Image (cartoon, rainbow, N blue to C red):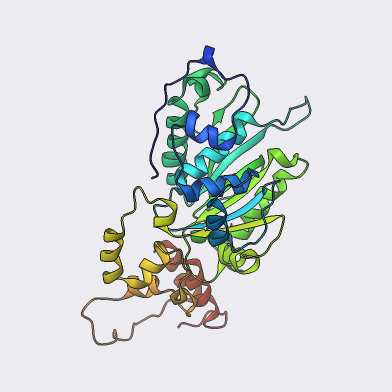
Amino acid sequence: MATRRRPPILKPSESPTRPPNILEFFRDWLHFQPSPYQTVLLKTLFGIPLVGGEWVIYQRATGRGRFYRLGFTEATIISGARGGKSILAAGIILFHAFFSKFVLTSTDQPPWAVIVAQDRNAAKGVVLTYLKRLIRGNPILLSMVAGGEAGLQADRIILSNGWTLGAFSSTDASAQGFRIAVAVLDECAYYAHGATMQNTDEEIQAMCQRGQIGMPSGSKRLIKISTPRGKTGLLFNDYSRWFGKDDPNHLVWRADSISMNPADVKPEELDILKESDEVRYRRYYLAEFGDDEAAFLAFQDIERARVPGRTQDLPPAHRRSTRAESIAAAGRAGITSRSVSAIAKSRPTGTSSW
């Protein structure tokens, strides 16, 4: 995590007379000083002009030659592990929810600012807890929650301005009925994807985009942020289509762990990891998409099924599993969606055994 800065905590009666910009919010309200790369990323998202050497960072991380001063309502952020994704995701949705200029009418469905996590435990046990901790860390923010502590509910955070903060899982469709104005798809490279899967990364994106229809541009934002995985899925598709392109509507940002968070990620630690497993080192810390996941079965699924020390095939089973049984078992074992899809396509449907 980048270097933190602890200015004096303001009391609710000392609230500033004007809303902060995104950089002021991180620095003065969340007490977090973004790194140079994180600073340029936030400036790019919100259209704050760059100065001096920030142009070099911008060009390295985006491959672009032009800067758009209107910012971006949709962005794909590909970052190495430990690059500060959690604080960036939380800060962005908190900023929108607390300081949106969108004014609710009596007929408006209340807007939500959400983080979509990989599973339910991460959504409720980690993400919401983190958001509440950040809010409790600033008395002014807590005073803007409906009912103070009472508004920090078990499954949501209700603000006095009509906005609601929440966290949903990528494994179910629980967010379908809400008006999601601001969404962060956290670690979306690890969502399900493929034609045979339910609640895929593409479906989750479409669900969020649907909720943003009719919202003014300054009050809606869709952020996809993740460490990369294989050369499939929403994250890689965005990278292939938009990285290095001077498009005014879609931003793709890619930076390694050390560039994003030099205060916490040390080169000597990564050198050790590189020696033990260069494939994962390049994916996790250099933010490179892995070639190993373009194979018929994902590398990690092959490793999960392998029995160390076994050199012979298993003896023939008395009864081979049906296709449906094998697919179901693969899903329960945590096999990736791509490998399950490969299993499904490896033989025709029917009742005969494998």
Q: Whole-percent x and y of residue 217?
A: 73, 42
Please state, as top left, top right, bottom left or bottom right, where the N terminus lies in the image: top left
**Quadrant housing residue 179:** top right
| Left-right relation of 171 to 308 | right
- Above or below 59: residue 306: below
Nearer-the-camera pick, 94 or 22:
22
The residue furthest front is 52
- Quarter holding residue 258: bottom left
Residue at (67% x, 48% y) in the render: 73
Considering only vertical position in the picture, is 132 above or below 206?
Answer: above
Q: Position of residue 303 (x, y in %)?
A: 33, 73
**Residue drawn 55% across and 79% down?**
345
Relative to 225, say whether 149 is above or below.
above
Q: Position of residue 203 (x, y in %)?
A: 64, 57
Residue 332, horizontal then vertical, whole percent: 42, 62
Residue 334, visible in the rendered structure: no
Location of residue 93 by image quarter: top right
The residue lying at 55 percent from left, 18 percent from top is 15
